[in-house]
Each structure stands twice: as structure tokens, then as C-alpha cells.
Image (spheres, helix red, strand yellow):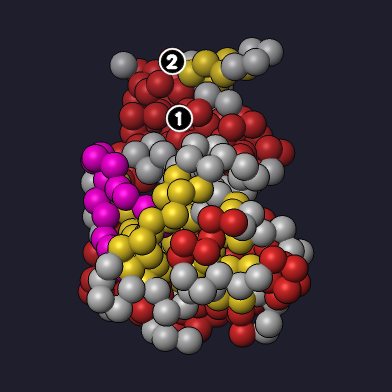
Amino acid sequence: MQIRGSIVDRAFHFWNDAMNSDDLRTFVRIADSMSLSTAARVGATPKSSLSRSLSRLESEIGAKLFERGPRVLRLTEAGRILLIHARRIMDDLSEAEAALDGVTGQPRGLLKISAATTFAIGLIAPMLPEFLRCYPELRVHLEAENRLADLANEDVDVAIRIGAMRDSDLIARKLGGIALWPCASPSYLSRNGTPVVPSDLAGHTLIGWSDQPSIWRFHDHANRESRVSVGVGTVVPEPAVLQILLEQGGGIGRLPAFIARPAVAQGRLVHLLAGFRTEIVEAHAVYAAHRSLSTKVRVFVDALRTHLMTPP
């Protein structure tokens, strides 16, 4: 019990004196992954910075927190004790920040966002300058990566997810729908002809997102549905990469409207079958159920939703 009290007392002393909650966050992140390399990748932070942060915390507390093996880390007794209290400190700090936001009405601190690369480039990055001008006390850490962040265990405030939501413990707020535009380059169309109705697509090179056969659906003004089968051929799951392939005349593919619109306006792509309504994919902002919806998350979600729904 004396060891337990000493470690916790020193942790609180370190946190209160140095006000360095980042070192405690780093410790929790490393403990969650049990790997410096994984923790560095998840936090988009250099491995050397994590090592310095951990060494600083161990020095202040006066105890080793991990046993370092060739491939893995293991928590020491001191590390196991501190982890329980560190999580509590982080939760209390988040609640305190949310409470202060509610009192002052001004969001502040660090907002960590996770989004797929295409969404981060095409939608979030363009709206961030104005958003940060409106909320100067906010700092944003945007992780653009094509993986699903583990919101229950990672230090992420909000993630943007595209498509149908799976059943989970996450709380989701709908941002809006994103139309999928069939597109091709002028050079491709000059060689192969321009489809006028959906059935004309059958004779063209169609580029899909999946290595499984799929269906493209179209609806006319009378809401009559046409279906086009897309076999397994060239597959490009990343829309930002698909855009380059299409602009170089590689075929016909579907792009999210926010990606396709600038290229169409500049004449690099042609929006095909524009008189037909195409499929819509839903975008959601999600966060872990154990996190309260802080002011900083709320104002970001509201701003992103407005940006998504505002016609260009």
C-alpha cells in the first residue's frame, strides 16, 4: 500500500506541478497498444517523442512503468497501479474541459478527428480555416487514414464514417448524404462514346471499388430504377486515386460528388447521366458512448454538416 500511495501521489504531484497531461495521455496510449511503434502510428507522433515523454514521466514518478522486451512491453506493478488512476485523471480532465466549455460558451483545447483520406482532403480540410477562425482557442489534430479508429480505446474525440453504420456502442450523428457521380474524362469519351442512358454503360470499361461484382443504380424523373452490373475488373477502392485514373482516360467510375465537382467544373472530367438520380451514401460523425458530447465536438459537427449541405 505504501508503494501504491507513493506512485499515485507522485503522479498527481507531477500532473499538478507540470500541468503535463500530455505525458499521462502518452502513457495511457502506450499501455493500450503495448507497443511504442503502434502508439506512435495511432497518435501520428514520432516514436522518439513518445519515448521522451515516457522517460520524463518515469523520472518524475521515480519508478519504471514498463518492462521493455525485444518485441513487446509489459506493465510493471507501478505501471498497472498508475494506469487505473491515469485513466480517471484523463476522464476528469475531459469532463472539466466540457464543463468549462458549457460555462464560457467557447470551445477550447485539442480536438482530435479521425477521417478517411478522401473525406479529410475533400471536405474537412477546406472547411477548417474558417472553422478555426471562428474558434481561435481550439487546436485540431486531423488524422487522415483509411482505417477505423478504435474510439473506445484511442484518444480520438470524433471520427467521420461513410456508408451504413454497423451496430456498435458508438453514438452516431448523421451529417448528410453524398451523391456518387459516374464520371469519365473527355479523352475516354471521345474514343468510346458518351452514355446517354444507364444501359449504355454495358459496353464501357467500368472501374469499381470492390473486388466483388456490384450494381450501380439509377432513377429517372419518374423514379423508375435502372441497374447496371459491374463485374470484377480494375478495382480502385480509394476515390482520390480513382479520380487520377479516370482523368487519364482509364474508364468510367463513380466518385463522391465533393471530389468530382471541381474536376468537372475544370473540364478534367465529365459528369455522366446527370439527368438520373444516383445512389447516396450517408456520412456520420461518431464518438464513443463513454465520452460526453463536448462543445468542441458539437461545434465541429455542426460546422461540417453545414459545409456538406451547402451548395457550392
Q: Is residue 168 magenta?
A: yes
90 left or right of 115 in image: left
Q: Residues within 10 Å of mark 1 (few under 14, many from 20)?
A: some
Q: Is residue 232 above or below residue 219?
A: above
Mark 2: which secondary structure?
helix
Where in the figure is residue 77, as x and y percent of width and height? 43, 15
Where in the figure is residue 105, as x and y percent of width and height? 28, 78
Where in the figure is residue 240, as x and y percent of width and height? 63, 60
Residues 71 and 92: in front is: 71
Is residue 87 visible from the viewing direction of this image? yes
Q: Which quadrant holds the N terminus?
A: top left
Q: Is residue 188 magenta?
A: no
* Residue sitting at x 29%, y 42%: 166
Which contiguous range is marked in magenta? Answer: 158-177
* Residue sitting at x 40%, y 21%: 80
State which quadrant residue 222 falls in: bottom left
Give the CA separation, mark 2 to mark 1: 16 Å
162 left or right of 271 in image: left
Residues 246 and 107: in front is: 246
Pointer 2 residue: 77
For discs 2 and 1, the disc positioned in front in the rendered view: 1
Q: Main secondary structure of the magenta part?
A: strand
* Residue sitting at x 39%, y 74%: 276
Q: Earlier in the sequence, mark 2 or mark 1?
A: 1
Say whether marks 2 and 1 touch (CB < 8 Å). Answer: no
Q: Residues within 10 Å of mark 2 (few under 14, many from 20)?
A: some
Is residue 257 visible from the viewing direction of this image? no
Which of the labelled discs sits on residue 32, or is there none? 1
11 left or right of 175 in image: right
Q: Amino acid at mark 2?
A: Glu
